[in-house]
Image (cartoon, rainbow, N blue to C red):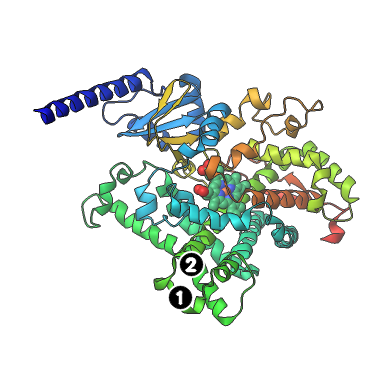
Amino acid sequence: MNIFKSFVLLAVSLLFLCLFVNRYRRGLHLPPGPKGLPVVGNFLDVQRLQKSNELPWVTYTKWSHIYGDIFTFHVLGSRTIVLNSYKAIMELLDRRSHNYSDRPYQPMLNDLVRWKWMFAFMHYSDWWRLHRRTFHQFFQPRVVSDYYEIQKERTSLLIQNLATSPKDFFEHVRAHSGGIILEITYGYRTQDEIDPYIKLVDVAMVGMNASGLHGTYWVDYFPMLRHVPFWFPGASFRTRAEAWARDTDRLINIPWKLLKERMNEGDTVPCFATRNLEKFKLSPTSSNDSSESVMEEVIKDCAANSFLAAAETTVSAILSFILAMMLNPQIQARAQKELDEITDSNRLPDFTDRANLPYIDAVLSETLRWNPVTPLGRSLPVHWGFEVDANTRMAALPHRALNDDVYEGHLIPKGSTIIPNAWAVLRDESLYGPDTQNFDPDRFLKQDGKNIPPNPELLAFGFGRRVCPGRYLAINSLWLAMTYLLASYTMAKEIDPVVEYSSGITSCRFIPRSSVTSFN
Ligand code: HEM
């Protein structure tokens, strides 16, 4: 009888607890958002957005004008919360980053297209931490100066290549960014070595962009579908995923295999991969792909991750800078004047000059603000001169809430996908002043030193524990490319460039500057 009484008491208490928790949760509302249909939620809105020509960050910004800085939408039971203000992004993703450092599970991308080795897509876990730590040791502020010589050499080559074939500037910029990271990670040095690897990235990115947009495939909502056999009616996504997965495998395996062959022949230069393998006393002769040790797997993953993460993003930032200079000749002339005064127009700039070039620093900040590489927290696949369809532009690197949280009276339930709309913040006139669609470095140079807007680096490189670990290297590469370009050329319009990434610019004239051509 006593046992029965205790059981009833426990059940009643549990019931009250549930009611209390429910009341607490009911009292708090989810952030508002577009009204959806029963069961499918906003499935149709999202489909419409994916098929439309409107860029998703633009649509999200419009929705934020209707629903507020923080809004929600649902698709088939999965909840997405979009943050559109500096305050909300910094409070949640930065200050409360312990709760928002996870990534949503994407069965199509991670499992079927086999990107789960990429730590940018991993869950917040010990496995991710091991990767991040291994990576960080070679890209933290203390060590990035070790890469100055590689960056200078590659940037000089970019300037020379532009003189030889200016029409191929897009390829030259890609070879520049790819060349820097390939030498740092795998020790590859020559031009001939770089091109095939850049092609591997290009090919693998097709599958990544197509599968990385959560919700494009039903399997993202119903993960069980990943077990559907290839021959099953309607399972064409499995065949497509398998073809993309083979490209992913090639991206991670081919550079590694070549590195090991070279190590066996004693023909390598010190780099991220070799120095790490030595550190953990891993001999390439004693291991092959099927018997990799755990640490070898981590080093191999990190090398491929840095290669992929660095190549596209840095290219995009440099192309944005070139576009801004072409469209704003007076800003270009002012930056060149500042540079010439420091270098006396008879040498190339160096990192030690940076503190004396405040206007160029403002141009760098404005470049990151004006056309952010990662409008929704991930890089844009920029292919100037090519049409990129709306789906590929939609990709984002979202965060995920690990536990229930409350923000300004809104409930943010555990498991919600969180998208930071950095683009909306970087265009916010209350922070960056008027006409944020225009390129104007002066917004960062207030004479009185007051009301300086937030540094765009805080938004462009992501947030909290997931902030881009390659940002110090990226800023150095960008600064050097900008200053070498300004010192060596005047960038001018050949035809009217379209200020859009999708249809993009097709041509730029690189006019050698007579005062500096002697040292090219
Ligand atoms: C202009 C250049 C770059 C931009 C704008 C950029 C931006 C970003 C952004 C927004 C994220 C996501 C952060 C988040 O989830 O909150 C990220 C992640 C990452 N970036 Fe970068 N990045 C750049 C260059 C690089 C470079 C040069 C490297 C490598 C050397 C790199 C390596 C990574 C890695 C490994 C991650 C994943 C971090 C994680 O999930 O823990 N990035 N980057």
Mark 1 nearby-residue class (10 Å; few <14, some 14–19, many ≥20): few
Question: For residue 113, which quarter of the picture?
Answer: bottom left
Q: Nearer the viewer, residue 389 or 149?
A: 149
C-alpha separation, residue under disc 2 versus residue under disc 1: 9 Å
Q: Position of residue 351 (x, y in %)?
A: 78, 52
Residue underneath mark 1:
287
Give the numbered dot on residue 435. none
Mark 2 nearby-residue class (10 Å; few <14, some 14–19, many ≥20): many
Q: Position of residue 347 (x, y in %)?
A: 86, 56
Q: Residue at x 52, y 60 (%)?
A: 304
Q: Quadrant of the C terminus?
A: bottom right
The answer to whether residue 280 is visible is yes
The residue furthest right is 344
The answer to whether residue 54 is visible is no
For residue 266, side relative to residue 14 (left or right): right
Q: Amino acid at mark 1?
A: Ser
Q: Secondary structure at mark 1?
A: loop
| Contact between labelled residues 1 and 2, with CB atoms less than 8 Å apart | yes
Residue underneath mark 2:
296
Q: Is residue 68 above or below residue 98?
A: above
The residue furthest left is 1
Q: Nearer the viewer, residue 53 or 425?
A: 425
Q: Quadrant of the N terminus?
A: top left
Q: Amino acid at mark 2?
A: Glu
Q: Residue at x 56, y 34 (%)?
A: 422
For residue 218, side relative to residue 451 (left or right): left
